[in-house]
Amino acid sequence: MITLPLKSMTLNEKFLAIEMIWEDICHTSADFPSPAWHEAVLKERDERIAKGQDKLIDWEVAKKQLRESL
């Protein structure tokens, strides 16, 4: 079992750990199934973008904005 010193980690360190784990999962788990509700959520988001109710931003920009807000 792997343990992390969560109590002593900063919020930024925790987010970086999550990001590292997610990157590894994405690159090593090609057969990772999407949950059943995922398609409906994606369709709803596509509709909101098409109607101009939402907009896409680059993932790197989004991460930067999140880090700056913390």
Image (cartoon, rainbow, N blue to C red):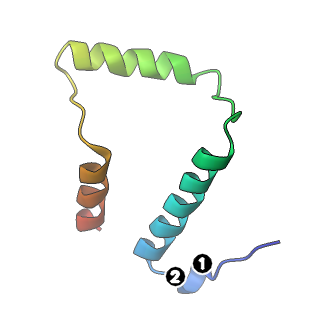
Q: Quadrant of the N terminus?
A: bottom right
Q: Position of residue 70 (x, y in %)?
A: 29, 68
Q: Is the residue marked by circle 2 packed among few (<14), some (14-19), or many (20+) residues within 10 Å?
A: few
- Give the camera-side residue of 66 and 61: 61
The residue at 23%/57% (across/down) is 65
The residue at 63%/29% (across/down) is 34
Local secondary structure at mark 2: loop
Local secondary structure at mark 1: helix
* Callout 2 touching callout 1 (CB < 8 Å): yes
Q: Which residue is mark 1?
A: 6
Residue 16, labelled with which disc?
Answer: none
Q: CA distance from mark 2 to mark 1?
A: 5 Å
Residue 9, labelled with which disc?
Answer: 2
Say left or right for 40 vs 68.
Answer: right
Query: Given the image, on which type of amino acid does mark 2 rest?
Result: Met
- Give the camera-side residue of 54 and 22: 22
Say left or right for 48 vs 29.
Answer: left
The residue at 69%/36% (across/down) is 32
Whether residue 53 is situated above or below residue 47 in the rendered picture: below
